[in-house]
Amino acid sequence: MHIAPGQDPAAENSYEVGRIDIVLERADIGRRDRLIIYEGNSRSSDAILIDINGNSGSDGGETEFPIEVTTSSNMVIVEFSSDQSAQTVGTGFLAHYKSHKKTFWDSYILVTLTFLTICSCMCCLCFRCMTFTNHHREVENDFGMDLEATDRGASLSSINKFPTFTFTEQHKLKLEKLEQEISCSICLGDYEDGEEVRLLPCGHTFHSPCIDAWLQINSICPLCKVNVIDLATEKRKTKRKERRKQLVNKVMRRGRGSSKNATISPRKSDEVLEYTARSNQL
Ligand SMILES: [Zn+2]
Ligand SMILES: [Zn+2]
């Protein structure tokens, strides 16, 4: 038996069903009888809403009534099977159904969800495109090489913040004294007089054109593998903190000196303390 509630027999007020409430008031299921209510137009085991089975020996008398279920399907299938035996046949079941009109959301939720999914996919793609375009830049280099910068690389303006010097014999002696390389680990060439050499925050040196091209692809030092951009930021922060500390010490010393001479007003000493507290917090 197939039932599609909401279909007015007079067909005067027929409407599209979006949801069905089922209330199974009672069921008299005999041995070898079975009542199954499926949602939708399928009799698969996944679609079972109610299953009262007398085949297993129980007669459905143990089931507590009423049983109330709601399905978002616009159709239910009620299947009552009996072995027709006079001794075992059940007398049937009593159920009522209430259908709910399909609302705007019922009708358009799938369309809306699909639309939103497409929109988010497009946004993701656009964002990827934008970021890809941003990173799809050439490595500026003195070798005339066609290289592509990556998102792990540093910008030339950040690289230019690292100091450079023109290599001389004195630099060679100094580097040898410090037991540092006197050749560039990228091109493996020795530093020659007059060549521009860049000093990284980790203390390692390279030919300026070599390291500039390298860092645009990957911002780690080829020798110690430290991220030189992060290291430079850290060093700047530490330097700023040190400078603040020195300033506070200076103010405190002055404050103490002045209080010895009893020239500092109580209000001023409060200001000094407040400033110190604030600096420490920072
Ligand atoms: Zn080099
Ligand atoms: Zn290094």
Image: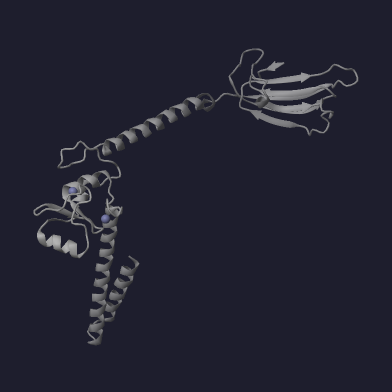
Work out whether residue 13 or residue 233 is closer to the camera in this orientation and state it: 233
Work out whether residue 60 or residue 137 is closer to the camera in this orientation and state it: 137
Residue lying farthest bottom?
A: 261
Residue lying farthest left?
A: 194
Work out whether residue 265 or residue 44 is closer to the camera in this orientation and state it: 44
Work out whether residue 84 or residue 202 is closer to the camera in this orientation and state it: 202
Q: Position of residue 236 (x, y in %)?
A: 25, 60
Q: Position of residue 200 (x, y in %)?
A: 22, 55
Which of the 4 image quadrants contains residue 173?
Answer: bottom left
| Left or right position of 127 against 39 | left
The residue at the point 52 percent across, 23 percent down is 107
The residue at the point 69 percent across, 27 percent down is 49
| Quarter of the N terminus within the rendering | top right
Which of the 4 image quadrants contains residue 58?
Answer: top right
Q: Position of residue 109 (x, y in %)?
A: 51, 27
| Quarter of the C terminus within the rendering | bottom left
The residue at the point 21 percent across, 64 percent down is 178
| Left or right position of 138 against 112 | left
